[in-house]
């Protein structure tokens, strides 16, 4: 189960990062992916710590991917919930 969850999360991670990078202005997508990432992070850490040492050689990669996924989720929350109003200020009399 440890290996299966790792590969599912790894595939999700790659798809997630690619879509995130090419769709930075799609706030709805960023929000959705950020919340899915929260679930993936919880599942990842639960599986990692509940499985104990498995000796499969991917233990370090699993941990690294979970922590990097936290950073990706933070970026997605930023891009998903940031306000665009600062760049769209129209002054009276300007066209």
Image (cartoon, grey):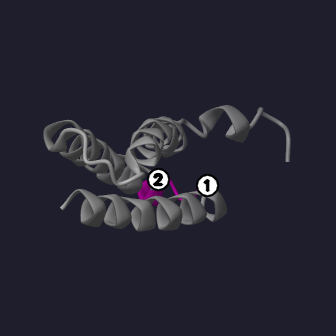
Label 1 neighbourhood size at 10 Å, few (<14), some (14-19), many (20+)? some
Residues rendered magenta in the picture: 25-29
Question: Is 41 on the left-hand or right-hand side of 71?
Answer: left
Q: Is residue 83 magenta?
A: no
Per the rendering, the mark at residue 30 is: 2
88 left or right, relative to 41? right
Rendered-image quadrant of the N terminus: bottom left
Q: Which residue is mark 1?
A: 24
Q: Secondary structure at mark 2?
A: helix
Query: Compared with residue 75, is residue 2 higher up or lower down, i.e. above or below?
Result: below
Q: Residue at horizontal 29%, vertical 50%?
A: 40
Question: Which residue is painted at 61% across and 55% down in the image?
Answer: 25
Q: Could you tell me how far apart the alpha carbons at marks 1 and 2 are, in whole angstroms? A: 7 Å
Does 44 appear above or below 21? Answer: above
Residue at the limit of the structure toward the front, as seen here: 55
Residue 49 lies in what quarter of the image? Answer: top left
Q: Marks 1 and 2: CB-CB under 8 Å?
A: yes
Of mark 1 and mark 2, the one earlier in the sequence is 1
Residue with the most extreme left position: 50
Q: Nearer the viewer, residue 74 or 56?
A: 56
User: In the structure shown, which secondary structural element does the residue marked by tag 1 occupy?
Assistant: loop
């Amino acid at each position: 189960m440890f290996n299966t969850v790792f590969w599912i999360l790894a595939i999700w991670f790659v798809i997630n990062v690619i879509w995130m990078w090419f769709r930075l202005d799609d706030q709805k997508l960023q929000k959705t992916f950020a919340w899915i990432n929260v679930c993936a992070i919880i599942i990842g850490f639960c599986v990692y710590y509940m499985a104990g040492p498995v000796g499969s050689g991917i233990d370090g990669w699993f941990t690294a991917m979970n922590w990097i996924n936290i950073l990706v989720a933070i970026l997605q929350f930023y891009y998903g919930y940031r306000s665009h109003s600062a760049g769209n200020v129209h002054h009276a009399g300007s066209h």
